[in-house]
Image (cartoon, rainbow, N blue to C red):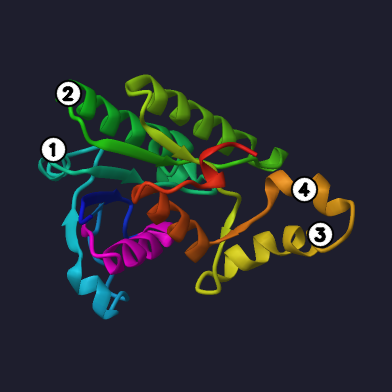
Amino acid sequence: MKMKIVVFGGSGFIGQKLLEILVKRGHDIISVSRHGRPDSLTEKWADKITWVSSDILNDHEWQKYVKDADWIIDSVGILFENPKKNITYDRFIVQPVREITDFLKNNKSENRFLFISANKGPFIFRKYMEAKYLAEKITKRQNKNNLIVYPGLVFDSVKTSSIVITLPLRILNHIPLLNKVIIGYLPIKRVTLAKEISKIIDGGQSIYTKRR
């Protein structure tokens, strides 16, 4: 069944692959991000996306696209903070969820909301995980039928840093006994995550809808 799906952060690392998978499934896809379509994104599938330039924290342009959407997906996020540039977990993880869910609640919308959280994180990502936990609470408080997915660190060859960061965990996963210890931290390929979310949208089951 063809659905209207709004993806916040669609121009980002996870968002781009999600848009590609969903639009190839025949859905009507709208991407909302601060700068719209990236100049580097020249693939033909991207021509089928409705690209909306809107800053969710500073304008309301995005709201008219959300009103009649079947699904809203929040793929906005950062892995590392840079407070000097106002790039913080609160601004890029917590506040977008609060803005979206408040709008849905105030408009008594019947559409579904999906938040991309994280399964587990090592101690160095403690603040990152705290922000994700808070965003999860906000998501569930707005509507108990909202969905949350819990992937590990996401990697893809198009982003070298993601390969480097996840390499130790991917190596340990091939070592007997140790692989059981790190099971909750296992990285996930970007395309795999996108396909899992697409499956969920279409009514399928996924292990990523529960924390492992």
How far is the residue under mark 3 from the one under mark 1? 45 Å
Contact between marks 3 and 1 (CB within 8 A): the answer is no
What is the number of the mark on residue 108?
A: 2
Q: State the image coordinates of residue 66 (x, y, percent, origin top left).
A: 17, 41
Q: Which secondary structure lies at badge 4?
A: loop
Q: Which secondary structure lies at badge 3?
A: helix
Q: Is residue 150 toward the left or the right of residue 51 in the image?
A: right
Contact between marks 1 and 4 (CB within 8 A): the answer is no
Q: Quick one: label 2, few (<14), some, or many (20+) residues within 10 Å? A: few
Q: Which secondary structure lies at badge 1?
A: loop
How far is the residue under mark 3 from the one under mark 2? 47 Å
Residue occupying image coordinates x 74% and y 57%: 169
Amino acid beneath label 3 = Leu
Nearest the viewer among 16 and 78 is 16
What is the number of the mark on residue 190?
A: none
Q: Which secondary structure lies at badge 2?
A: loop
The stretch of residues the image draws in magenta is: 12-29
Task: Report which residue position mark 3 lands on.
Answer: 172
What is the number of the mark on residue 67?
A: 1
Contact between marks 3 and 4 (CB within 8 A): the answer is yes
Task: Report which residue position mark 4 lands on.
Answer: 182
Amino acid beneath label 4 = Ile
Query: If you read the primary sequence from the N terminus, does the residue marked by circle 3 or circle 4 appear first?
Result: 3
Residue occupying image coordinates x 47% and y 48%: 78
Amino acid beneath label 2 = Lys
How far is the residue under mark 3 from the one under mark 4? 8 Å
Q: State the image coordinates of residue 77 (x, y, percent, origin top left).
A: 43, 46
Q: State whether residue 167 is above or below residue 158.
A: above
Q: State the image coordinates of residue 176 (x, y, percent, origin top left).
A: 89, 57
